[in-house]
Amino acid sequence: MGKINVLVHGALGKMGQEVLRALCRDPELEAVAGVDLKANDKELILPDGSRSIPLSTDLESTLERYHPDVLVDFTAAKATMAAVRTAVKHNVRLVIGTTGLSTTDLDEIKSLCQSRGVGAVVAPNFSLAAVVMIHLAKMAARFFDYAEIIEMHHEQKVDAPSGTAIATAREMVSSRGKAFLHTSATHESIASSRGGELDGVALHSVRLPGMLAHQEVILGAPGQTLRIRLDQINREAFMPCVTLAIKKVVEFNEAVFSLNQLLGLEEGNC
Ligand SMILES: NC(=O)c1ccc[n+]([C@@H]2O[C@H](COP(=O)([O-])OP(=O)(O)OC[C@H]3O[C@@H](n4cnc5c(N)ncnc54)[C@H](O)[C@@H]3O)[C@@H](O)[C@H]2O)c1
């Protein structure tokens, strides 16, 4: 099989640039075009300086002209949904890393992909460590009645709590089959001090310069706590699973919302 041709949506962004860097390193993948709202030039020099690719603000015409096999999207939730509708119409598979997508958005991605038989991988966190963390947290969730999640990100992150924290809480609750126990403060002198709450899991968001992406899941039982800690120190952490998703998605004809299947972490292994 020849190389898989990839269009990067959000090509001028921090993640878009990292994806282009990863594509340059992988002999099975080829960057064929970039699309970004902020594109002023018609060409984009690849991060390794090897060559330029076409750059545009117009996704539809770029798809029509360069026929990518896969569109990788790291943009913003609204931009993602417009891109999904356009890409599916052109039978282009999707690898979506943008966070902040609602359950309505996810349902729409699922039904659009199903109706056209187009593959997609949608994951709020492509870091291998994050996927394994969620797997471990799911495993632990069955044995503890109380759980809280502290997620810590750089100060420019726009959404809170992080997609990974929400996904972790959802997976933990589903593994337990019921909500966790949650205690609210009877007197909260500063509003929201107990954080947000998802089915009994308290969620706390920290936003600070000097951080990239970190998360701690703390499970509590009488006389003991279990902490599972994740630290992503640079954006390269996401790339092995992004390139794996690009290679796998070409075999899919529906949307997949977890990397577990790609990594062989099936339910039964939990
Ligand atoms: N899934 C993961 O593993 C993972 C990891 C890191 C970041 N993210 C998410 O990826 C997204 C992007 O993160 P980032 O740090 O690269 O942000 P960024 O702001 O650096 O880049 C986003 C890029 O998208 C472009 N964009 C915005 N709207 C657009 C539109 N309508 N059409 C075309 N391009 C558009 C912007 O111009 C920008 O260049 C965020 O949602 C972030 O939370 C996910």
Image: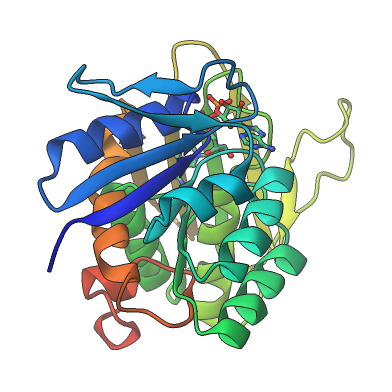
Instruction: Determine the quadrant in which ligand 1 lies.
Output: top right
- Tell me which residue sits at (32%, 63%) in the image: 136
**Residue 31 vs residue 112: left or right?**
left
Would residue 195 be seen by someone viewing this image from the given angle? Answer: yes
The part of the image, by quadrant, that contains residue 37 is: top right
The number of numbered badges drawn on the structure is 0
Q: Quadrant of residue 267?
A: bottom left
Foreground of the two, 150 or 49: 49
Q: Considering depth in this image, is 54 or 211 the residue closer to the camera?
A: 54
Answer with left or right where residue 185 lies relative to residue 71.
right
Q: Is residue 213 visible?
A: no
Residue at image location 27% in from the left, 69% down from the top: 248
Q: Could you tell me residue 234's position as x and y percent?
A: 31, 26
- Give the percent coordinates (x, y) of residue 29: 21, 50
For the C terminus, give its image quadrant: bottom left
The answer to which of 34 and 186 lies nearer the viewer is 34
> In this orientation, which residue lies closer to the viewer: 233 or 226?
233
Q: Is residue 252 above or below residue 65?
A: below
Residue at figure coordinates x 57%, y 72% from the top left: 173
Q: Quick check: 263 above or below 100?
A: below
Quarter placement of the N terminus:
bottom left
Report which quarter residue 157 is drawn in: top right
Classify 162 as above or below 241: above
Q: Residue at x 14, y 53 (%)?
A: 28
x and y, in percent, of residue 99 in the image? 59, 46
Give the left or right position of residue 144, taking residue 27 as reference.
Answer: right
At which x and y percent is residue 49? Answer: 21, 16
Reply above or below: 215 against 43. Answer: below
